[in-house]
Amino acid sequence: MRISILALAATVMAGPVQALGDCAPDKVFLRGDWGQAMFSVEVADDDAERAKGLMDRPSMPRNAGMLFVYEKPQSVAFWMKNTLIPLDMLFMDETGTVRRIKEMAEPLDTTPIPGGKDIQFVLEINGGLSESYGIDVGTQLRHPAVDQDKAAWPCEGD
């Protein structure tokens, strides 16, 4: 199992979505039975960016986050080495559907956090936001990094 360094940096604006607008690399939209949220994110889509993640950041705006993008679905595991803030990790498949959530990952913990098999996207947000918003397994991601032919929630249309 490959271990990716877990501290990822992202700026996420979360909260009820008034108007979704167009997909953009620096924004992710989430929707589920709980409602909708928008986050402004940094994207980590190469080995160096994924390895650095959100490490060494003393804080992150409430509605900030980081989206990890892998070239293809795979088994992933993260850790919190050198990550100073608690994080929620949303592990998603190639369609952008949340398959697993790790809530409140503990800062500086080097214990691997498995995301599961066939994971292509991981969204890290401030710890506790998943519970606060009601984000759960089955939640869908809208972002241009998701292959739009496979996306559970494509950028065009609802």
Image (tube, helix red, strand yellow):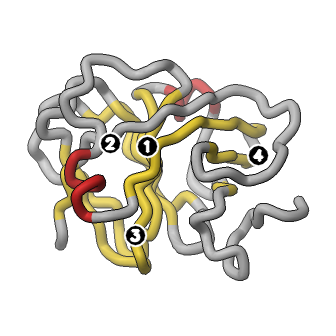
Q: Which quadrant would the C terminus be assigned to in this image?
A: bottom right
Q: Which residue is mark 3?
A: 70
Give the numbered dot on residue 12: none
Q: Which residue is mark 1?
A: 66
Q: Between marks 2 and 4, how big is the CA–CA gap?
A: 27 Å
Q: Nearer the viewer, residue 60 or 94?
A: 60
Count residues near mark 1 (Cα–Cα under 10 Å), then give few for <14, some for 14-19, many for 20+. Answer: many
What residue lies at 26% left-to-right and 25% top-to-bottom?
57
What residue lies at 22% left-to-right and 57% top-to-bottom?
48
The first of marks 2 and 4 along the sequence is 2
Secondary structure under the numbered disc 3 in the rendered image = strand
**Residue type at numbered disc 3:** Tyr
Q: Between marks 2 and 1, how big is the CA–CA gap?
A: 6 Å
Secondary structure under the numbered disc 1 in the rendered image = strand
The first of marks 3 and 4 along the sequence is 4
Q: Which residue is mark 2?
A: 8
